[in-house]
């Protein structure tokens, strides 16, 4: 009997609903006991698709990077004695925007996601001195942003990725409140940085959340003159050049080899366009290396053990940043992040630009490359679980040894328990990308013909090793189903042929685990990112190689 929901699939026979488819006291004592403050993470700025670019844009990129250092330097101050520096911490400007976010928000995941924005406000005489000139109709209090970075720290606080969003990205801006008038603005397609220009940080948060499905927990804005002050407070930053610089546009003259840059020269250096091959990519890497030097000096023992220098540095940083009150006032949160610094350093920090391609409608704009960008977002929003604690010695003695299996060792049959056509094949494709050996797809009829509310995982009762395979599969599904003994009956079952042939198939006799997809299914955890994402992630050697 033919099922009314069956749909033909090219190259795979008749796949039932499997058509292809295309985020004081105690705390003070803990702080005092900490061995070392954390090295602030940094990020490469958005990579422009154009060879040129104004100096103001480049400067704003590095300013946004420094906001990362600002955030974590607040932690450094807490670790070295919050009481001594509380006056400097008091300079942090606070802004509450929760009431201005009018769109539904993604759920919390246990990760820490901080939105970092470089604000080129012209308010104040220091800020008004720098950057591109505004139009005659704009005053010195106007603000824009060329840099938007999402800093993601895993739930276990041992990994971090900083994602840069190119300012020229053409995206769907959701409905937002105008920052000045508080009137609601309708949704529109526009450059991503226009969300900040008209709706401020609240609209920027909403835009990032609706585009990525990732919950933004906190934000930090750094103003225009902050970078110069921070570099000067550090006593300058040493760089190394293969050839000299004599650039009129940035008013920078430097000899080959090493140079110590003060704040003014540093501004010229990060704006430097005509150097090396003149490409935007090479300039971005120079800026990334420069920031790594800022971070290294800001977290060095020379600074942290000098009370006067550290106070001056924290004052310079704090005076240039605005945070949400929840982050700025939560010393415990900052210290908890600080206490994980060693793990974070060991796990590594990755700096990634959203994969993009030129906008077909305007070669001077970009659109995000799909499905690559969405796979990057999924890897962030499915980073949900801290590592399980090690069992006690007594428990280990009696417990069955835990078998660690790779996805490639797990055979899976995916069954569609919903009314959504093609769901089994959609999930099968996601699992196959993550390395699981998907051997079949089909359907599952829930009681009464209703959609299955929650996803389920089933394994054969007679196979003693099956629970280990089921646990590996369960750990890759969001939300995580609880494996159950006893297989279910599949309807319209058929073989599944992955787009990329399996080279190392599990041995004969390996149990087949059933994943029955329910209405609550969100996604498969993404751990294997596309080449376009990996190619836009700066390497550790590139971060450390300062003489390039």
Image (cartoon, helix red, strand yellow):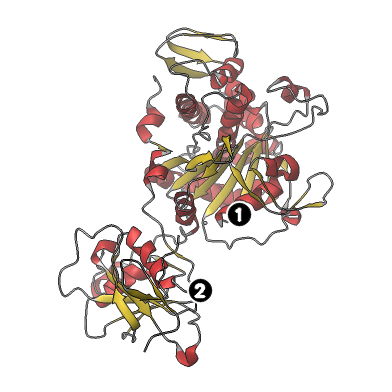
Give x and y (percent) for residue 372: 44, 50
Foreground residue, 322 or 360?
A: 360
| Quadrant of the drawing holding the N terminus | bottom left
Could you say whether the residue bearing mark 1 is in a helix, strand or loop? helix
Whichever of callouts 2 and 1 sits on the residue coming sooner in the sequence is 1
Seen in the picture, residue 225 relative to 358 is either above or below; the reply is above
Vertical relation: 508 (above or below) 170: below
Residue furthest bottom in the image:
448
- The residue pinned by badge 2 equals 520
212 with respect to 255 (left or right)? right
The residue lying toward the viewer, choosing from 117 and 83, is 117
Q: How packed is label 2: few (under 14 Cα within 10 Å), some, or many (20 or more)?
A: some
Which residue is drawn at the image coordinates 26% and 83% (left, top)? 460
Query: What percent of the width, then of the height, locates residue 453?
Result: 50, 80
Instruction: Report if residue 25 is visible in the image.
Output: no
Q: Residue at x 58, y 17 (%)?
A: 268
- Drawn side of residue 487 relative to residue 95, left or right: left
Residue on which the image places disc 1: 209
Crowd band around label 1 with a 10 angstrom C-alpha radius: few (<14), some (14–19), many (20+):
some
- Image coordinates of residue 365 in percent, x first then y, are 58, 37
Q: CA distance from mark 2 to mark 1?
A: 20 Å
- 403 or 299, nearer to the observer: 403
**Which residue is rendered at x = 43% and y = 9% of the image?**
256
Q: Position of residue 523 (x, y in %)?
A: 45, 65
Hey, which quadrant is residue 359 in on the image? top right
Above-or-below relation of 209 to 465: above
Residue 201 seen from this side = yes
Residue that appears at 21% across and 81% down: 463
Q: Quadrant of the C terminus?
A: top left
Q: In the displayed structure, would residue 86 be above or below residue 204?
A: above
Residue 17 left/right relative to 101: left
Quarter residue 399 falls in: bottom left
């Amino acid at each position: 009997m033919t099922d009314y929901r069956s749909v033909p699939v090219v190259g795979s026979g008749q796949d039932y609903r499997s058509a292809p488819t295309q985020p004081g006291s105690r705390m003070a004592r803990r702080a005092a006991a900490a061995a070392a403050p954390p090295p602030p993470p940094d990020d490469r700025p958005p990579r422009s698709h154009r060879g040129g670019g104004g100096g103001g844009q480049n400067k704003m990129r590095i300013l946004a990077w420094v906001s990362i250092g600002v955030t974590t330097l607040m932690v450094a101050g807490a670790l070295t004695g919050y009481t001594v520096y509380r006056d400097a911490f008091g300079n942090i400007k606070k802004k509450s925007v929760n009431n201005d976010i009018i769109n539904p928000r993604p759920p919390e995941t246990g990760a820490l996601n901080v939105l970092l924005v470089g604000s080129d406000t012209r308010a104040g005489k220091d800020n008004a001195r720098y950057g591109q000139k505004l139009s005659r109709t704009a005053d010195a209090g106007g603000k824009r942003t060329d840099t938007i970075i999402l800093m993601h720290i895993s739930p276990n606080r041992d990994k971090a990725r900083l994602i840069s969003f190119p300012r020229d990205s053409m995206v769907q801006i959701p409905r937002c409140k105008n920052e000045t008038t508080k009137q609601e603005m309708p949704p529109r397609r526009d450059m991503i940085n226009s969300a900040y220009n008209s709706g401020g940080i609240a609209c920027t948060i909403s835009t990032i959340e609706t585009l990525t499905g990732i919950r933004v927990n906190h934000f930090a804005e750094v103003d225009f003159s902050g970078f110069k002050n921070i570099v000067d407070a550090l006593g300058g930053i040493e760089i190394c050049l293969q050839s000299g610089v004599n650039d009129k546009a940035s008013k920078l003259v430097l000899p080959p080899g090493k140079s110590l840059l003060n704040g003014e020269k540093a501004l010229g250096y990060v704006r430097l366009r005509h150097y090396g091959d003149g490409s935007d990519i090479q300039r971005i890497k120079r800026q990334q290396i420069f920031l790594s030097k800022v971070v290294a000096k800001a977290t060095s023992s020379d600074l942290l053990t000098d009370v006067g220098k550290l106070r001056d540095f924290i004052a310079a940083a704090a005076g240039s940043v605005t945070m949400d009150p929840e982050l700025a006032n939560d010393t415990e949160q900052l210290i908890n992040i600080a206490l994980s610094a060693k793990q974070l350093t060991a796990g590594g920090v990755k700096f990634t630009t959203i994969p993009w391609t030129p906008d077909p409608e305007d070669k001077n704009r970009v659109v995000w490359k799909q499905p690559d960008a969405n796979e990057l977002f999924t890897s962030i929003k499915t980073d949900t679980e801290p590592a399980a604690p090690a069992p006690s010695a007594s428990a280990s003695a009696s417990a069955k040894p835990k078998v660690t299996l790779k996805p490639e060792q797990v055979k899976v049959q995916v069954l569609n328990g919903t009314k959504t056509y093609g769901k089994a094949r959609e999930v099968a494709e996601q699992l196959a990308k993550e390395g699981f050996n998907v051997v079949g797809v089909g359907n599952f009829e829930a009681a009464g013909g209703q959609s299955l509310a929650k996803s389920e995982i089933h394994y054969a009762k007679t196979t003693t090793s099956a629970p280990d395979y089921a646990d590996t599969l369960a750990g890759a599904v969001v939300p995580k189903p609880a494996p159950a003994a006893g297989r279910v009956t599949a309807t319209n079952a058929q073989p599944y042929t992955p787009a990329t042939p399996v080279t190392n198939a599990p041995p004969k006799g390996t149990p087949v685990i059933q994943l029955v997809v329910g209405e609550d299914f969100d996604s498969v955890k993404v751990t294997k990112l596309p080449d376009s994402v990996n190619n836009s992630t700066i390497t550790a050697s590139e971060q450390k190689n300062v003489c390039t």
